[in-house]
Amino acid sequence: MDARVGEENAAEENTAFGLAAPGETQAGTIPERRGAGMRLRAIARAYLVVLLVPVLILVFSLLAPSTFATLGTAQTLLTTNAALLILAVGQTFVLAVGEFDLSFAGLVGMSGCLMVAFHVPVGTALVVSLAAALVTGLANSAFVVLLGVNSLIATLGMSTVTTGIALAATSSQTVPNPYGGFGKFIIYRIGGIGVTFYIALAAILILWGVLERTRLGRNAYFVGSGRKAAAYAGIRVNRIRTLAFVVSAFTSWLAGLFLFGQSGSADATFGTGYLLTVIAAVFLGYTAIKPGRYNALGSLVGMLVLAVGTTGIEVLAAPIWLTDVFSGSILFVAVALANVLGTVQGLKALRSVID
Amino acid sequence: MTETLRTPRTATRPARSSRLARPAVLGAVLATGTLLLTAACSSSSSSSSSSSASASAGSSSTASASAQSSSLTAALQALEQNPAFTAPGPALDAKKLPASTPIVVIDNTPSVGPLEETSAGVMQAAQDAGFSPKLLNGGANNTASDDINLLEQAVNLHPKVVLQVGIITALETAGLQYAKSHGVPVIAVDDNAPVAGAPGEGSGPLASGTSAQDYTAYGQVLAEYVAAQGPKNASVAVITSDDIVPSTAILAAFQSELAKLCSGCSVFTQNVDTADWSTQVTPTVTSILDAHPSLNYLFPVVDGMAPLVSPALSAASDSSLQVISANATPGSAMNSVKSGQFAAEVGASPEAIGWYGFDAALRVMLGLPQQTSPNEPYSFFTTAEMKAKNLDPNSVSALFGSAYQTGFLKLWGVSS
């Protein structure tokens, strides 16, 4: 059995943010006997955050019809949020198995910086950069899975280590991308939308397929719900947790390459600005499509809500503090609404049982 | 020579299973070792590295040291006044452009005081010239993607020109390519030091112009101050931030000029990246002062560090130490000069940078050649001067005047 170390109930970690464990509402398990009203509420709860996307688009289109409601704005919005989306893929998987990975903030910068550190052909640089990212993912899992270090602490430390390596690789400076062909590929557009967005979209769809349609996905959610129970059920818990950290490192590497190519430079601090945004997008996704479960399509919705909101505020030339207030408040409002709906649903269920 | 700052170690919990512990520890050590080895191989210097270099072998003039000192002092005193307007190029006629000409200004770091003033300068310049520019505020997450997003959003508005404030053009290739493919010229305001005749005036071939402070001159002026006022063997500690583009130019010019003017002077540098300012600047200054009790000058390269340097100075007992810095940012930094905590500063009006940027934009829109002398005039400040003139350290106009405003409006044919 490889699941003996550090197997506290992951549900406790999930509830650390006031979120229910997968398969549960905030008020308890829903009885099978449901009325039409409850089903409607369940649908409303699942698609409340999804509805935010068209609502926000409508609001900003009305406020800025000539500037926001354009094809160009949509294309730009999708293209420039590819890094956020690909990072959300990794974070969704990690959170689904009941862990945290904050090392992506440093790993994004390190991936780009290692591309320029050794002055080697682009293929070699890609291999070196990828290898370093995967080693980081394995190191995370070694600390968390084998040594039992809390994932929040271990990956936060790893984020600092990788930022330090990135600074060392570039002498703390912004270093131009020497690989013109690679840069051209990253900023290449199809239908006005950057190729990076298509890659990120493919990744999120693959994650959706894995989580929703395969045994690995079911096992991942099982591990996220309770490691001990999963281990007793014969699931290779530590293998799945390790895989999650490696996948997260891989998506962080991809995000690093996206930013390296899009910006045309390597910079150690590229990832730091994404820390809260990515977590916010995934937490928002937790309340959408399949509320109470970190899910791929939910994360896509979370990314869209944040991207549409911040872009709209920027186009309106609103005060900058409004963007921060929006990003923060949309998260807790969404989670609170989902919880309220869940509570109402639970109370109804309880009443029906009593009746 | 200088101390290397260490980050606190995080304690790791002992492994519960000895069978698992050995491979676990081995794996973790190997993984961490690989990462550290990668770092060690990749660069000869790190963010917290320090270097010591003697500013040696400068060929001084044949004049005596005292004559040189007098000459430098006189030159510096000439800079202790509001700068006169210097036209960056030949006169032009802004009225050839219709007032409805679409112009977009991007303020990407509106939470940074001086950049806010620079954005305000761009907007005021455009409005005084008869245009109605549109402002985009950004910088929410301050990521490279945000920069690119904002520039593309600006281009999507189909403007005649985009002026972006506080964005490093080296970090937004995709956005600049997008602008180029849509035929929209981009002016980088407060980016690299302007270079007349260079592509993008120094901001690269994808930019159409730039305006910024004369960072090279700042380094030279402060070296002249040290050579004029300090002992022949003055010792200077520089706290720099390699991740700030202008700091490299300021430091290089300072070292080069001091080597010419003072062969006995020594300079050593300590790098603190901007992300570490709040936690490392104060202890770094304390360490430097403890390790070098005979230090003559402390030079935080950019005065944004002023609030973090001051606490360490307050604790130090050596009153002969002089602090010098660059940018002359109105507010906390210039308050430090007036109070005597800092001895001298050099810098230019942040608002004027916006006006110089808009001049570059007008030339692009009118199809005129680039500015011939794009560097913005600057001023030199000392504690004695600020006290004597009772300058308001918080007022941009008091510190730098407003000659550039009337000068530009005449240059553009807007006023007579």
Image (cartoon, helix red, strand yellow):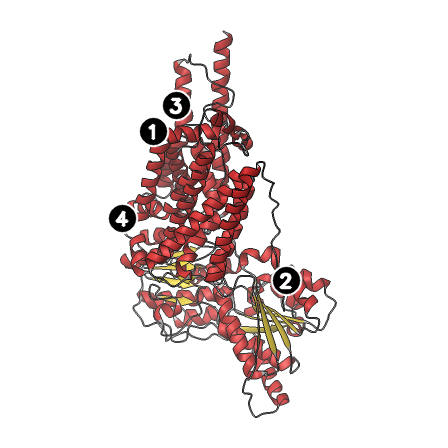
Quadrant where the N terminus of chain B is found in the figure: bottom right
Quadrant where the C terminus of chain B is found in the figure: bottom left
Q: Nearer the viewer, residue B413 or B290?
A: B290
Q: Residue tagged by mark 2? A: B284
Which three-letter amino acid code belongs to the residue tagged 2? Thr
- CB-based contact (under 8 Å), mark 4 and mark 1: no
10 Å crowding of disc 1: few (<14), some (14-19), many (20+): few
Which disc number belongs to residue A321? none
Chain for disc number 1: A
Q: Residue tagged by mark 1? A: A213
Spatial CA distance of label 3 from label 1 is 21 Å
Q: Based on the displayed image, in which of its 4 quarters is residue B6 positioned?
A: bottom right
Which three-letter amino acid code belongs to the residue tagged 4? Gly
Chain for disc number 4: A
Chain for disc number 2: B
Q: Helix, strand, or loop for circle 3?
A: helix
- CB-based contact (under 8 Å), mark 3 and mark 1: no
Spatial CA distance of label 4 from label 2 is 49 Å
